[in-house]
Image (cartoon, helix red, strand yellow):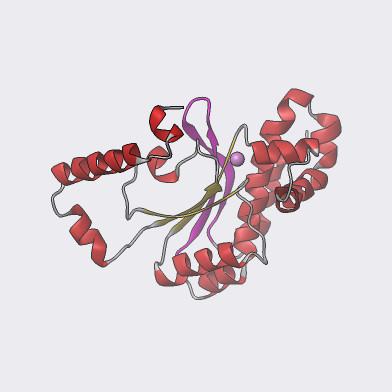
Amino acid sequence: MTDQTKNNNLEHLFENNRQWARAILDENPDFFKKLSSQQAPEYLWIGCSDSRVPANELLGLLPGDVFVHRNIANVIVHSDLNCLSVLQFAIQLLKVKHIIVCGHYGCSGVHAALTNRRIGLADNWLRHVQDVHQKHGRYLGEVLPERDRLDRLCELNVIEQATNVSQTTIVQEAWERGQELAIHSWIYDVKDGLLRELDLTLAGPDDLQAKLPQSMARYQE
Ligand code: CO
């Protein structure tokens, strides 16, 4: 801990901020002026709150490029008004073309769900990840060596949450209107900083039924 944080003085963050804004203006003097009147991101990122998985930075994107929703273990619940409002805003008002559901290896939320570890209020939130665990219990429990279980549950959680996104009324209605919209299933590795694509991209109302069996095939050996 630095002396500054010990003293409750966060001036170093303001200094960082001034340097950051200056660096952007050096490249593009009109950057903030242009952005201040509107945003037109093409992407909605739904990811984990984990501090090691910052959407803009790892995508190499600037302010204005990606609309972001993050929660513990990147869970999409059909009754979560927070997430649904983000989805609706992103799809109907901003007209994003891509929704990226991105999990990450080493997710402590997924780990807690896997091991039934009690951490407090969030247990109720992570119950949704436990549902994913339970749904794939045979594969994760009997088939898979223990060391692989966390990685595979992190991946399966992404696929299940991307499926949930595709089944919301908001996405279904967008596709019915003929709006161009694809949902992507990605996973990020905190150990190498790289994104990987999981095999489920949904771009229309019939895609889930057509593609899910193939996406799930590798989780059944
Ligand atoms: Co996480």
Residue 199 appears in view: yes
Whether residue 197 is in magenta: the answer is yes
Percent x, y of residue 120: 74, 46
Q: Is residue 133 above or below residue 203?
A: above
Percent x, y of residue 150: 70, 32
Percent x, y of residue 11: 32, 40
Res 27 quadrant in image: top left
Whether residue 183 is in magenta: the answer is yes
Q: Which residue is pictured at 71% across the width and 36% down the height?
A: 111
Q: Which residue is pictured at 64% across the width and 64% down the height?
A: 80
Q: Which residue is pictured at 67% across the width and 45% down the height?
A: 157
Is 42 on the left or on the right of 192, as rendered? left
Percent x, y of residue 81: 60, 68
Extreme residue toward the front, this view = 7
Residue sitting nearer the eye, 199 or 85: 85
Residue sitting nearer the eye, 125 or 193: 125
Residue 220 appears in view: no
Q: Where is the C terminus found, in terms of image quarters?
A: top right
Is 73 on the left or on the right of 29, as rendered? right
Is 106 on the left or on the right of 177, as rendered? right
Dominant secondary structure, magenta: strand
Q: Which residues make up the magenta segment?
A: 179-203
